[in-house]
Image (tube, helix red, strand yellow):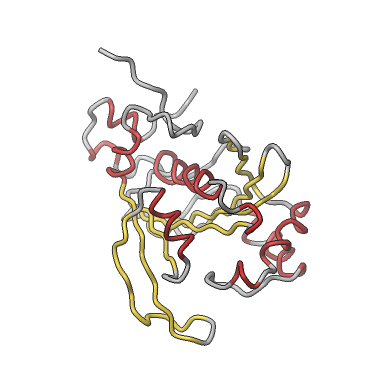
Amino acid sequence: MRRETTVDMWLRGLPASVWDHRLVELTPDYPIATSRLLLRPLSEADTDALVAYRSREDVCRFVPFEPMTVDVVMNRLRENWSRTTIIAEGDALTLGVELVQARQLIGDVVLFFRSAEHRGGEIGWVFHPGFSGCGYATEAAHALLHLAFDQLGLHRVNARVDPRNEASLRLGARLGMREEAHLVSNELFKSAWSDEIDLALLEHEWIRQHAGSPRWCDSPLAPPPTSAG
């Protein structure tokens, strides 16, 4: 039986106080399918595909890690990338993004559970440049937001982006995230001071996006269309 989501509650006219702290963990049913993609836990079988893009200088330029070797990727797979659920504040869930038609891993997305008290989280994404321009990153990140808001029950989701990373800024805008802050020279990043743009999306903004189950959202996690009348 499908679990009632935030949007379902809003459509039934329930006040915000009913939603607060109703969910305490995230245990998705895998794989999570969109029209073209599968979001699923990573495994050692993904090592070569992960190294293919996470070892690239251009991919790592604006993200908080250096190009990864096979050993680094395998260590991550055995440690923090092995998580398949979120059960407590501080947990992070990294999921591989597989292109269904090609049966190929093309990127990964991550959801951080930052605060239980404030129901806050953060998302991030890394994709192979060879698959850019097709909307795959937007499709995957949107499905991740369904997990964040509709299943984990977050109130607020952030994304932190280097202002030079124009592609990620455009992706955030397509997700409906607002630019809330431009922090100037706030972090010593890869031996140089860098700026940071903070993007955010709130629960009520997410609900407003999905009221009436818009056709552009094909996620299986979205609530079904409501009947007229």
Quarter where residue 153 is shown: top left
Q: Position of residue 33 (x, y in %)?
A: 59, 35
Q: Position of residue 117 (x, y in %)?
A: 32, 55
Q: Position of residue 192 (x, y in %)?
A: 48, 86
Q: Residue at x 33, y 38 (%)?
A: 209
Q: Quadrant of the C terminus?
A: top left
Along the line of sight, the residue nearer the viewer: 87 or 149:
149
Q: Residue at x 21, y 35 (%)?
A: 15
As drawn, the residue found furthest toward the front would be: 133
Q: Residue at x 54, y 82 (%)?
A: 190
Along the line of sight, the residue nearer the viewer: 25 or 169:
169
How many numbered marks does the figure carry? 0
Q: Position of residue 174 (x, y in %)?
A: 41, 49
Left or right of residue 225: residue 100 = right
Left or right of residue 60: residue 104 = right
As drawn, the residue found furthest toward the top would be: 229
Position of residue 186 relative to residue 58, above or below, is: below
Along the line of sight, the residue nearer the viewer: 192 or 220:
192
Along the line of sight, the residue nearer the viewer: 49 or 11:
49
Q: Residue at x 60, y 37 (%)?
A: 36
Position of residue 127 relative to residue 6, above or below, is: below
